[in-house]
Image (cartoon, rainbow, N blue to C red):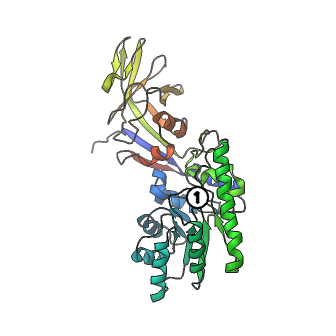
Amino acid sequence: MTTVSRRAWASIDLGALRKNLTRVRSLCPASKIFPIIKANAYGHGMAEAAAALADSHTVIAGFGVATVDEALALRKLNDELPILLLNGFVTAEELQECLCNRIEPVVHSEYQAEIIGEVFSKEILGEHRKFWVKYNTGMNRLGLSLEQVRLVYQRLHTYPDTQLVLMSHFACADDPDNSKFSDFTKRQLADLQSLRSELVPVVHGEIPLSLAASAGILHWPESHLDIVRPGVMLYGCSPMAHETGEELGLQAVMTLCSRLIAIHDLKPGDSIGYGATYICDRDTRVGTVSIGYGDGYPRSAANGTPVVIKTAAGPVRTRLIGRVSMDMITIDLTDIEGVSIDDEVELWGENLCADEVAKSTGSISYELFCKVTPRVKYSYLDE
């Protein structure tokens, strides 16, 4: 059988994933950790990420996902740890799936409290009845108003053997140097803590709080509270507006690569690619790389977007020139010695932070990871 050489591949470093989790623990020594592995672990592979995180020396309290389908798939992979369902349930049937599978749904709307009441009035299903009640402190996406959250929390508290967490979500924690955003973030934290202080004497018990995701973990230690929910920082990238994952000391987990399939020389005035978006201003050596938007490399990547060519002498940083097409990109090889056909080209990862690439595409690293397509072959390293 003929062996077909690789054209685009992603190497996932599970050791780096666990090291980033260790970083979370060092920043939040007193908080429980719910790693967020929604969207196929941000494109890294939910099954592999869940196994690696559960097997880490850093103890985790559970996992977080976004959809019921994700939660049920994860439950088949891991029968031990609780699963936080960030988007909550919509129907009584979905609630029953949560109750029967130790899935902890977020209650963010009054209709969900009504469904819980209807279901519990007939039969209290499952042995693990835990809800995360979401207070809208300013994100204005999901969450109960102050008046609603008071009523819903107290109502759910009346059901026997039912645990509750009070949570919210930061809107602007990614830019702590912006005084307007900083004040907004502090106000969100104060509002959540104030609500807990109000409810504790009413329910006569402790009320665990959860607010911080990656940005809060990294830059707002006062927001760590009882439970943190790390997401993109686990995968080596930054949630911050003006810092990359590399600058924050995080380790890249995904390295996306392809290979050089053509080299040609152009003269000043020659154009490259669809739309002639790049015009050579000198003698230019161009390399064609076997990856494009059909593989998930962003078509929006502008001229100058960084890439790394791995020559015989070592990795050399260069740049994209010409428009991204479905199956290929073109890169500048001018003045780079020792380049050969089939040399490896890194699009982001070990030698090039995905946050930097994302900036050149007008996007964020989260989107880069999630858009990698099935044409890319994944391999997992675990050292």
Determine the secondary structure under disc 1: loop
Residue at the limit of the structure toward the front, as seen here? 147
- Residue 224 visible somewhere in the drawing: no
The percent coordinates of residue 154 (x first, y second) are 60, 78
- Compared to residue 337, the image places residue 261 above or below, namely below
For the point 48% across and 79% down, the residue is 116
- Compared to residue 280, the image places residue 252 above or below, namely below
Name the foreground residue: 67 vs 107. 107
Give, as a three-letter code, the residue at label 1. Answer: His
Name the foreground residue: 1 vs 154. 154
- Compared to residue 92, the image places residue 210 above or below, namely above
Q: For mark 1, what is the residue?
A: 169
Left or right of 332? Residue 64 is right
Q: Quadrant of residue 222?
A: bottom right
The percent coordinates of residue 77 (x first, y second) are 47, 67
- Compared to residue 303, the image places residue 27 above or below, namely below
Residue at the limit of the structure toward the left, as seen here? 1
For the point 37% across and 32% down, the residue is 324
Residue at the limit of the structure toward the bottom, as seen here? 122
Name the foreground residue: 120 vs 334. 120
Q: Quadrant of the N terminus?
A: top left
The percent coordinates of residue 191 (x first, y second) are 66, 61
The percent coordinates of residue 150 (x first, y second) are 60, 73
Q: How many marks?
A: 1
- Density class for disc 1 (Cα within 10 Å; few <14, some 14-19, many ≥20) is many
- Residue 188 visible somewhere in the drawing: yes
For the point 65% across and 45% down, the residue is 180
